[in-house]
Amino acid sequence: MSDVFSHPWFGGLFADPEIEHIWSAERQLAHMLAFEAAYSRALGKAGVVDVDTATSAADMIEAFKPDMADLRKGTEIDGLPVPALVRQLKHSAGPLLPAVHAGTTSQDVLDTALALTLRSVMDLLAERLTTLISELNRLNEAFGSNALMGRTRMQAALPITVGDRIATWRSPLEGHHDRVNYLRPMVARIQLGGAVGDRRPLGDNSAAMADFMAAALGLQRSDTVWHSTRENITEFADLLSLISGSLGKLGQDICLMAQQGLDEIKLSGGGGSSAMPHKQNPILAELLVTLARFNATQISGMHQALVHEQERSGNAWALEWMILPPMTQATARALSASIEMCARITSIGGVQTEQP
């Protein structure tokens, strides 16, 4: 593996099993099949095909085991896996063929799978933000009244309390938690547009079918098609960078507080040096800074992916595939590392040896 999140040894630092599972090939494929099954049932519900045919087609799709090698080959040829998947489904459909993928398009499948994925990502982020805020509250209760030297431009300024500094760590996270909930209905929503995003092949049934599918998949209904309007996805990427950026500030502060000679914070566990056994490096704090800077560099790419030509883009869409999953991995890992780091803090402040 070439990326740090799944690398044999770098993964020990960067990997996050929960987010890896959310983005796993098996789960992505399950989301695509869930779309196709819900779509077949919607065709029956709308009277486009016979209800029994639609139900049988959906049952077949849900039990289907795709040929993964064929999906890989198909992606090489078609630029995405859906055409190969649909060919496999139609090959197995027999008399159920009218109820399989008729009137929808590949981007509907992949974007809805993305919405299902990001719904799980948002659930994970919200849960971890809540846990981290609780950890910071615990540290505030334990150490908040301790004295600490306030620093401006990395120079000793005036005395503060540990609680003052913890507040600068906690407050942005509370705002980010609210932003996750605000973006959830805008991101975790159905995509159903058809070939050119006008739903015209579905006729008067389009809105009802989209609503039926949204309810079946646990997604938000959508009155519009977002094939080439990716602002909500990009705003979510911005939020990922905001979260990791706030955690990077937390990590940077702890790195500075842990410097020998200052000793404003004590952490248990880890961080040895191969050459200097007296050192205890603040590894998790450093990781937070790295992940924050990684996400910050990805934001420009996500804004480049906003530029879709006409009704659909292949290049901008594919750029999104490359950038967004690692951003969610970096953010999820930053949250888990922050929670772990807070649990390792044994003391903060209490000793004031400097004068401004």
Image (cartoon, rainbow, N blue to C red):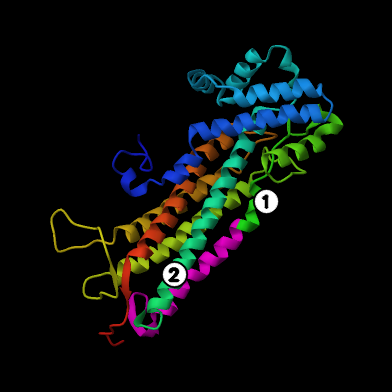
Q: Residue furthest right?
A: 204
Cβ atoms under marks 1 and 2 closer than 8 Å: no
Measured from the top left, where is residue 211 in percent x and y? 77, 40
Is residue 166 rendered magenta in the image? Answer: yes
The N terminus lies in which quarter of the figure? top left
Image point 54% across, 40% down: which residue? 320
**Secondary structure mostly taken by the magenta-highlighted segment of the chain:** helix
**Residue that badge 2 annotates:** 136
Measured from the top left, where is residue 324 in percent x and y? 51, 44
Front in this rendered view, residue 312 or 94? 94
Name the quadrant containing residue 350.
bottom left
Viewer-nearest of labels 1 and 2?
A: 2
On residue 108, the disc is none
Q: Amino acid at mark 2?
A: Leu
Image point 75% across, 18% down: which residue? 98
Name the quadrant containing residue 163.
bottom left
Is residue 304 rendered magenta in the image? Answer: no
Front in this rendered view, residue 210 or 289? 210
Q: Which residues are magenta?
A: 151-180
Q: Callout 1 environment at 10 Å: few (<14), some (14 to 19), or many (20+)?
A: some
Measured from the top left, where is residue 174 in percent x and y? 54, 66
Mark 1 or 2 closer to N-term?
2
Image point 76% across, 31% down: which residue? 42
**Whether residue 100 can be seen here:** no
**Residue that badge 1 annotates:** 185
Q: Which secondary structure, mark 1? A: helix
